Amino acid sequence: MTVLEGRQETRSDEASAPEDATGHEQGPPAQLVDRSIGDLIRELRKLDARQVELILQHQRQHGMRFGDAAIALKLASRDDVLWALSQQFHYPYAAEGGLGGLGGELVTATDPFSAAAEVFRDVRSQLLMGVLAPDQPRRALAVLSPNVGDGKSYFAANLAVVFSQLGESTLLIDGDMRTPRQHKIFGVEPASGLSNILAGRAGVDVEQAISGLPGMHLLTVGTLPPNPLELMQRASFSFLMQDVLSRFDHVIVDTPATVRGADSRVLAARCGAALVIGRRNRTRMDGLHDLVQQIARSHAKIAGVLLNEH
């Protein structure tokens, strides 16, 4: 059993990305990468010279970063600082409850410099050096878990977001046609989706772009079908995977918990690669082992097993 390094945690540590603490004159908007955090916050909050000087004095007195000093003086919010960091480093960021109704589960979008988000970036790096490496055959990645409540949908959503933050087109498919959650996590209407495509009642281009996250797209379940397993085993699903893999740089598929039936194993075989999620102090190791063995008997490559603390 391969175990990807790192544990998924959800504590919200202070942003740790580097900051320039000076308040230099503003540069042209096209050169955001060269502008300081001080410039960006000053422009966003419309701070005058006196307020900027107060921040700089507080920064020097307490040995703080500019953004932290502005927060301490209530001249900026933590969201302001995260936004400024995202602009400086060209990193997509959407405040919780902001664009697209993104909620707190999407830590990689709402808190991209937190320790929790860093775990997802670490997993992304390992996948790109493994089953999703450029020299490997083109594959989608199915995310599986033995039980309901293991955090599989949470993990799939955040993993998809960090792939999109590479500046590459990413599609998250909600393949859980029993208890779908991705439309709720991303705050979008279900509309037409996977089941409608497989039933021949929708085209293959009904993915929804996620506002505030460039390159991020979601294919919802659509109408809940009475026969999800039969739909997944149709040839149309293979055609769909071929199509999306030709149009997107990365494809992540959320699946039903394996206690719901064979759906997830069928999806893993269709995707070509599988990442198994368990929950620390809850998932039984024999259950994880059985799931990995079942996947190994299919055509899917096992990317690894990860224990979730969410």
Image (spheres, rainbow, N blue to C red):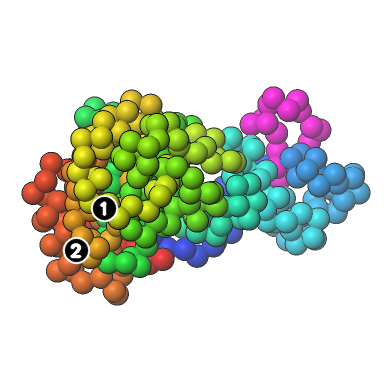
Query: What residue did someone put label 2 on?
Result: 288
Was residue 23 drawn as part of the magenta stretch in this picture? yes
Q: Residue at x 50, y 65 (%)?
A: 11
* Cα gap from disc 2 to disc 1, whole angstroms: 26 Å
Q: Which mark is residue 45?
A: none
Q: What's under tag 2, amino acid-wise?
A: Leu
Residue 284 painted magenta: no
Q: Are marks 2 and 1 in contact (CB under 8 Å)?
A: no
On the image, numbered disc 1 is attached to which residue? 227
- Give how far across and how far down residue 37 sits, in percent: 70, 42
- Check disc 2: other Cα within 10 Å, few if <14, some if 14-19, many if 20+: many
- At 67% from the left and 43% from the top, the residue drawn is 84
- The picture places residue 184, in percent across and down from the top left corner, at 50, 56
Q: Nearer the viewer, residue 167 or 153?
A: 153
What residue is drawn where x is 64% and y is 31%? 33
Q: Quadrant of the C terminus?
A: bottom left
Q: Residue 295: give x, y in percent of width and height.
A: 15, 51
Q: Is residue 270 above or below residue 145?
A: above
Disc 2 or disc 1, which is closer to the eye?
Answer: 1
Of labels 2 and 1, earlier in sequence is 1
Please count the marks in the image. Answer: 2
Quarter of the picture holding the N terminus: bottom left
Q: Quadrant of residue 299?
A: top left
Q: From which residue to which does the magenta span run?
A: 21-37
